[in-house]
Image: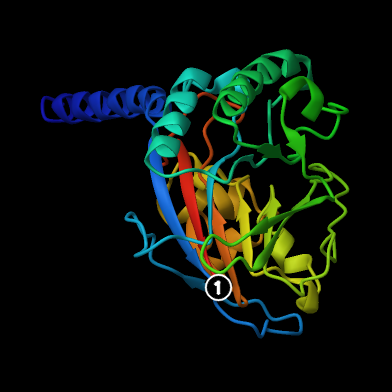
């Protein structure tokens, strides 16, 4: 009995430290850099989906990128200790070093519809910052946003749901299309099969759930895709229990794609860890993230 008590004490202390860290980690913010390159002009056809992890580039590519975005997702404003002010400070810092072409929000304003105003206030501050810097601010609908109506207006961003915007490469003046697809919600999902544009020019697709790439027709897959939704797992457990038991409907995590950069059947895909927390204000080994995305054709 004398030997058991110290062991139980150590276990109890470790559990308390674990819980404490789960509360602390959401207050951190990683400002990352993702350098995305066009992978292939030939998309892999058929139903087969291939997933290959790509190195996450923390330093800028040599020379000027074709496009430069500031991307963040999944604020879930009820449980988002990363304040709008901190995010605005990051946008200003990044933009002062090298101009941004756009700030992009990847969906999920709040977890619960009744808290929508909290999320609108958060995004409105980002919108004000972008107006001051003369940067366009775009966004799409996440699975928690479907019942909010026209959330773009009170949030202050330009909706990309089933819409496109044209850009010009800074290196070659080649045309590049920024396109968006909305999320249909958690239940009775309707997956899009085609982009809202042709892909005769390079396409950067913004979509909340990365599983979208699985459902797009092979000839309609974009060159680049930015998404969130998975929170990087949010709470990392051994053997990926968070995906094998708790989120079994998400397909890409079963193939190893949870966060970071991937080559998915010829499309360069970035999956953000997001900023906020879902049902509980916990994170473990998945620090909140905002990302400078540099696109290279």
Picture coordinates of residue 229, whole percent (x, y): 63, 45
Q: Quadrant of residue 195?
A: bottom right
Query: With respect to residue 181, does 112 lie above or below?
Result: above
What color scheme is it? rainbow
Q: Residue 196 is drawn in which quadrant?
A: bottom right
Residue 111 lies, with reference to residue 33, above or below; the image says above
- Residue 230 in percent (x, y) is at 58, 47
Query: Residue drawn at (57%, 52%), measured in percent from left and top?
Result: 243
Callout 1: 10 Å neighbours few (<14), some, many (20+)? Answer: some
Give me the residue at 78% from left, 20% from top: 154
As drawn, 233 above or below 126 = below
Q: Which residue is mark 1?
A: 38
Q: Nearer the viewer, residue 272 or 250?
A: 272
- Residue 68 is left or right of residue 120, and the answer is left
Quadrant, the N terminus: top left
Q: Seen from this angle, which residue lies furthest left?
A: 2
Residue 285 shows up from this direction: no
Q: Please tell me whether mark 1 sits on a helix, a strand or a loop.
A: loop
Hey, which quadrant is residue 102 in on the image? top right
Task: Where is residue 270? Give x, y as percent.
Answer: 54, 57
| Residue at horizontal 11 percent and vertical 25 percent from the top | 2
Residue 114: percent from the left, percent from the top? 78, 15
């Amino acid at each position: 009995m004398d030997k058991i008590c110290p062991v139980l004490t150590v276990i109890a202390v470790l559990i308390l430290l674990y819980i404490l860290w789960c509360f602390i980690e959401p207050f951190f913010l990683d400002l990352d850099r993702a350098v995305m390159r066009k992978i292939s002009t030939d998309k892999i056809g058929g139903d087969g989906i291939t997933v290959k992890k790509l190195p996450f580039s923390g330093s800028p590519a040599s020379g000027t990128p074709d496009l430069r975005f500031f991307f963040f997702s999944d604020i879930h404003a009820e449980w988002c200790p990363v304040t709008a002010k901190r995010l605005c400070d990051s946008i200003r810092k990044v933009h002062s070093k090298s101009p941004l072409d756009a700030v992009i929000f990847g969906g999920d304003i709040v977890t619960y519809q009744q808290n929508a105003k909290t999320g609108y206030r958060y995004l409105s501050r980002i919108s004000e910052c972008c107006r001051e810097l003369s940067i366009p601010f775009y966004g799409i609908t996440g699975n928690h946003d479907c019942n909010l109506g026209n959330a773009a207006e009170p949030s202050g961003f330009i909706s990309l749901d089933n819409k496109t915007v044209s850009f010009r490469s800074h290196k070659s003046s080649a045309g590049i299309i920024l396109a968006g697809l909305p999320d249909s919600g958690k239940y009775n999902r309707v997956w899009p099969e085609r982009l809202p544009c042709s892909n005769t020019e390079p396409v950067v697709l913004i979509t909340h759930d990365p599983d979208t790439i699985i459902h797009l027709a092979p000839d309609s897959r974009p060159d680049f895709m930015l998404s969130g939704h998975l929170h990087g797992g949010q709470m990392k457990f051994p053997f990926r229990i968070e995906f094998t038991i708790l989120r079994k409907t998400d397909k890409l995590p079963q193939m190893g794609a949870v966060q970071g950069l991937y080559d998915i059947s010829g499309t360069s895909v970035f999956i953000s860890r997001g900023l906020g927390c879902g049902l509980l204000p916990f994170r473990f080994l998945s620090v909140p993230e905002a990302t400078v995305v540099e696109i290279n054709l």
